[in-house]
Image: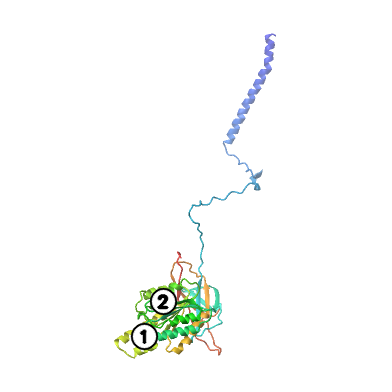
């Protein structure tokens, strides 16, 4: 083959190579343009759950959740420490119960009152009464009797008062008998057996000491009653003169304030002894008479603070009527319950006041008797209560 023919064979090859080079140059130019465009501002692409494009951008069309995909697991809780007990946090909303007696000036119970007739003030703030009922039930009481070798007439009065109280007990009443001189002694624990109560009273025949430690005996009784649930009563039969107590008057008042659901009724003894002392105005008699007056004030305070009453019978014949009044007052009471607006559990003492008002007004309620005469009455309730402390 000649040289010319060989060159003619390579002509198509050269043309092809030129075209491939030109195409490669064109691709390089296009790639540079794309890179330049990417380096500038770029329209965001629609999200995977987005829809078709528009003039203002992609339309957001949420995708249905994949039901086959498992739900995310909750965050892990605190690790359990071995040996540490489990604790729970609870909110305790306190409930305050107030027993109120509405009596005539003669001491008779006034029935028929409704919830809207009562108003309860705690530290001067009116409270919303949530529960209301009239209690007519047996009672749980401690007969706390002073029996010391001071005056013979006082011992006789104490025994007469104790027997008069036992006479009016009903079958479902539970009573404990405690006598005290220098220290309290439980003669019989709570029982509804009248024979056991009479047997305990029959044991009080020979007194031991002359000291009459009223504050110690009352403090010990309140401390024991504080462990018993429900409403309780203390029938204190005493001249009220404290001679040798370790507990001071201030401490016994604090104990009364701190003990809930206890009503104290006081029966004063020794009226004839006091009359005899007052008719002999010697120096010693004058001091003794002052002691009796102070004792009366103290027992009146005990009764008033707890919503009870103070009785000072002159003769033995008055005792049955006095104990009937106590029985009626204990068995027939209006019980008011409310959640205090002051929810702080700070252990402070809250003053209470119970009033009778005409429904829908702030005016005092007017009660009339069967002859349509306005009846004078008194509302007896405890002076206050001690709020729970947060650590209790």
Q: Quadrant of the N terminus?
A: top right
Image mark for residue 375: none
Asked which secondary structure carries label 2, the reply is strand
| Quadrant of res 145 | bottom left
Image mark for residue 185: 2
Can see residue 251? yes
Please rate how many residues cluster around mark 1, counting C-alpha atoms within 10 Å: few if below 14, some from 14 to 19, many from 20: few
Q: Name the residue: 32% across, 86% down.
A: 286
Asked which secondary structure carries label 1, the reply is loop
Whether residues under marks 1 and 2 lie with C-beta atoms below 8 angstroms apart, the answer is no
In the figure, is residue 277 to the left or right of 263?
Answer: left
Q: Name the residue: 69% across, 14% down.
A: 9
In the figure, is residue 273 to the left or right of 376?
Answer: left
Can see residue 377? no
Image mark for residue 151: 1
Q: Position of residue 13 (x, y in %)?
A: 67, 18
Q: How is the image coloured?
A: rainbow
Q: Position of residue 326 (x, y in %)?
A: 48, 82
237 or 290, which lies in front?
237
140 or 282, which lies in front?
140
Q: Residue furthest top?
A: 2
Structural distance between the alpha carbons of marks 1 and 2: 20 Å
Q: Name the residue: 67% across, 19% down.
A: 15
Please rate how many residues cluster around mark 2, counting C-alpha atoms within 10 Å: few if below 14, some from 14 to 19, many from 20: some
């Amino acid at each position: 083959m000649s040289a010319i023919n060989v060159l003619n064979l390579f002509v198509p090859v050269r043309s092809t190579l030129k075209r491939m080079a030109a195409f490669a140059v064109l691709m390089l130019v296009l790639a540079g343009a794309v890179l330049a465009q990417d380096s500038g501002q770029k329209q965001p692409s629609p999200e995977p759950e987005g829809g078709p494009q528009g003039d203002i951008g992609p339309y957001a069309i949420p995708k249905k959740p994949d039901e086959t995909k498992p739900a995310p697991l909750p965050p892990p809780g605190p690790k359990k420490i071995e040996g540490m007990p489990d604790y729970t946090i609870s909110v305790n909303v306190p409930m305050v119960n107030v027993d109120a007696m509405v009596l005539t000036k003669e001491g008779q119970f006034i029935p028929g009152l409704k919830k809207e007739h009562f108003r309860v003030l705690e530290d001067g703030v009116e409270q919303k009464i949530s529960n209301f009922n009239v209690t007519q039930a047996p009672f749980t009481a401690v007969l706390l009797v002073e029996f010391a070798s001071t005056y013979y007439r006082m011992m006789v009065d104490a025994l007469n008062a104790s027997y008069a109280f036992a006479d009016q007990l009903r079958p479902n009443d539970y009573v404990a008998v405690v006598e005290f001189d220098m220290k309290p002694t439980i003669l019989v624990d709570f029982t509804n057996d009248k024979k056991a109560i009479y047997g305990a009273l029959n044991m009080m025949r020979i007194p031991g000491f002359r000291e009459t430690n009223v504050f110690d005996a009352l403090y010990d009784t309140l401390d024991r009653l504080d462990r018993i649930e429900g409403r309780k009563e203390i029938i204190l039969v005493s001249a009220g003169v404290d001679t040798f107590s370790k507990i001071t008057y201030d401490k016994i008042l604090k104990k009364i304030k701190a003990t809930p659901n206890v009503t104290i009724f006081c029966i004063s003894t020794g009226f004839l002894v006091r009359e005899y002392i007052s008719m002999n105005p010697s120096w010693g008699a004058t001091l003794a008479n002052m002691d009796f007056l102070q004792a009366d004030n103290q027992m009146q305070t005990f009764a008033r603070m707890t919503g009870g009453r103070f009785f000072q019978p002159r003769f033995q014949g008055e005792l049955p009527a006095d104990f009937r009044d106590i029985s009626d007052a204990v068995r027939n009471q209006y019980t008011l319950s409310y959640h205090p607006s002051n929810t702080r559990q700070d252990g402070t003492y809250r003053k209470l006041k119970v009033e009778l008002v005409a429904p829908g007004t702030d005016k005092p309620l007017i009660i009339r008797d069967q002859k349509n005469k306005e009846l004078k009455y008194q509302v007896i309730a405890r002076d206050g209560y001690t709020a729970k402390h947060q650590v209790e």
